[in-house]
Image: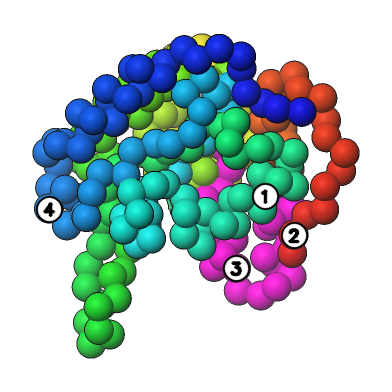
Amino acid sequence: MSVAASGGRGAQALAGLRTAARDCRACPLWKRGTQTVFGAGAAHARLLLVGEQPGDEEDRQGVPFVGPAGRLLDQALEAAGIDRRDAYVTNAVKHFKWVPAEGRGKRRIHQKPNAAEIRACHPWLTAEIAAVKPAVIVCMGATDARALLGAAFRVTKQRGVPLPHASGARIVATVHPSSILRAPDSETRSAEMQRFVADLRAARALLGVDAPAAAPIPT
Ligand code: URA
């Protein structure tokens, strides 16, 4: 069963925002990034997923979550019974922040966005939420959870617990898929993946959508 709403509200607003965000100069990250990586997905989605910032592949393709973290996210969504095409996926920061890897050719090393960069990008995220009007927002990682819930928020303490957001949506915070990719061994990775899928299932349950037939959780 789909987590999408019927109707097409917000599509026009999102198209306008996407065009305007191409020329955003609110922080210096546009100088390094190839392009603005705006959110993508169903304009009428009832579920909106937020990550931190685009990575290397996202920066090249201009689409969020299409690299390794995106592939893990796709597997977890499938296991949670969520069709990504019905959701809207975006990031707290819309440009890739990176530094060249010294002595390692053309590799670009991801750097965490700072508070000023997150603040500068926040109006785009707020506008996306206002256009999509999701019922549930999943924050993946501390950067976006703090952008929406305040600096005191701790994923370790409040993950998976539905919290209210000013838009009227409920927020479920969980870990960032990249943290699962960085797990030190396959046992930890598998346990972390199970917890991530459980958080996504909790978000899905908030939408009041029937539970899907149990899908296997990838290890
Ligand atoms: N990590 C993120 O937070 N967002 C992406 O789009 C890709 C990787």
Q: Are marks 2 and 1 in contact (CB under 8 Å)?
A: yes
Q: Identify the image quadrant of residue 46.
A: top right
- Measured Cα–Cα span from mark 2 to mark 4: 38 Å
Q: Residues within 10 Å of mark 2 (few under 14, many from 20)?
A: few
Q: Are marks 3 and 4 in contact (CB under 8 Å)?
A: no
Residue that appears at 29% across and 31% down: 18
Which color scheme is applied?
rainbow
Q: Residues within 10 Å of mark 1 (few under 14, many from 20)?
A: many
Left or right of residue 48: residue 2: right
Q: Nearer the viewer, mark 3 or mark 4?
A: 4
- Sequence-wise, the earlier of marks 4 and 1 is 4
> According to the image, label 1 marks what residue?
76
Q: Tell me the element at label 2.
A: loop
- Sequence-wise, the earlier of marks 1 and 3 is 1
Magenta highlight range: 170-197
From the viewer's side, name the closer residue of 187 and 155. 187
> According to the image, label 2 marks what residue?
218
Whether residue 33 is situated above or below residue 40 in the rendered picture: below
Q: Which mark is residue 90?
A: none
From the viewer's side, name the closer residue of 29 and 185. 29
Q: Tell me the element at label 3.
A: loop
Q: Residue furthest bottom?
A: 103
- Measured Cα–Cα span from mark 3 to mark 4: 32 Å
Residue that appears at 62% across and 23% down: 4
Q: Which mark is residue 183?
A: 3
- Measured Cα–Cα span from mark 4 to mark 1: 33 Å
Determine the main secondary structure of the stretch shown in magenta.
helix
Left or right of residue 151: residue 29: left
Residue 191 located within the stretch drawn in magenta: yes
> According to the image, label 4 marks what residue?
31
